[in-house]
Image (cartoon, rainbow, N blue to C red):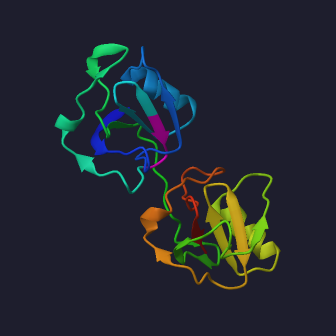
Amino acid sequence: WTAQGCYTDTSTSRTLAATSDVNETSMTVESCLAFCASGGFNLAGVEYGSQCYCDYALQASGTFSSAENCDIPCSGNTTEVCGGADFIDVYWNGAPLPIVPQTVGSWAYKGCFSDSVSSRVLPHQVTIPTGVSVESCTSACNASDYGVAGLEFGLECWCSSSLPTSSLLSDDACRTACAANTTEFCGGSSKLTVY
C-alpha cells in the first residue's frame, strides 16, 4: 500500500463509500489497510483518528487537500496520523482502478444518466445469477431483445428499447464498481451507466 494523500470528505458524500469500520480505541493505518484488503478493495482511508473507509475508486466528491488537514493521531497508535475532521488519508494497493469500457462487443457507452426508484428510466430489470458486470448486463439485455442496457449501484441491470430521456450526468457520478468485475464501473446510487 502507498499513501495517496489527504482528501476532503463529508458524512453525506463519502470519498471512499463502499464500506467502513470504526474503532474508537485501536484504529491504526495498518488495521484499516488489513480491513480493506480483506474485502478485496483497492483503496483504504483513515479519518477522525478512528474511522476506516474502503472503496475501489475515489468518489468525485473527494478533492485533494493539504496534508496539514490530516493531523489527528490514530486511536490505536498516536505516532501515526489517521486523517482529520472531514479529511481522509487515502492509501492505494497498486491494483488497477475501475474504468468505464467504451465498447463491449457491439455495445457502445452512452453516458451516465440519472434514475429514480419511483420512475425508472430503463423499466425492465434483469436478474443475473452470476453477478453484474458490463459484459453480463449487455449480454442479458441483448438476450431479452433490448438494445439499451443500464447498470446501477454496482449490482443492478436494467434494459430498454430506447435511450433514457433523463439528465445526462458527468461520468464522475457513476463511480460504483461492478459487483462481478471490480475493474469496471456500474453506475451509482440512482445513476445508470448506459450502453
- The residue that appears at 79% across and 60% down in the rendered structure is 127
Q: Is residue 136 above or below residue 106?
A: above
Q: Quadrant of the N terminus?
A: top left
Magenta residues, as a range? 53-57
Count of numbered labels shown in the rendering = 0
Secondary structure mostly seen in the magenta stretch:
strand
Q: Is residue 94 above or below residue 37?
A: below
**Residue 140, image x, y percentages:** 77, 68
- State the residue in front, 6 or 106: 6
Among the 4 quarters of the image, the one containing residue 165: bottom right
**Residue 78, image x, y percentages:** 28, 15
- The residue that appears at 44% across and 26% down in the rendered structure is 32
- Asked if the magenta segment contains residue 41, the reply would be no
- State the residue in front, 7 or 84: 84
- The residue that appears at 32% across and 27% down in the rendered structure is 82
Q: Quadrant of the C terminus?
A: bottom right
**Residue 179, image x, y percentages:** 64, 50
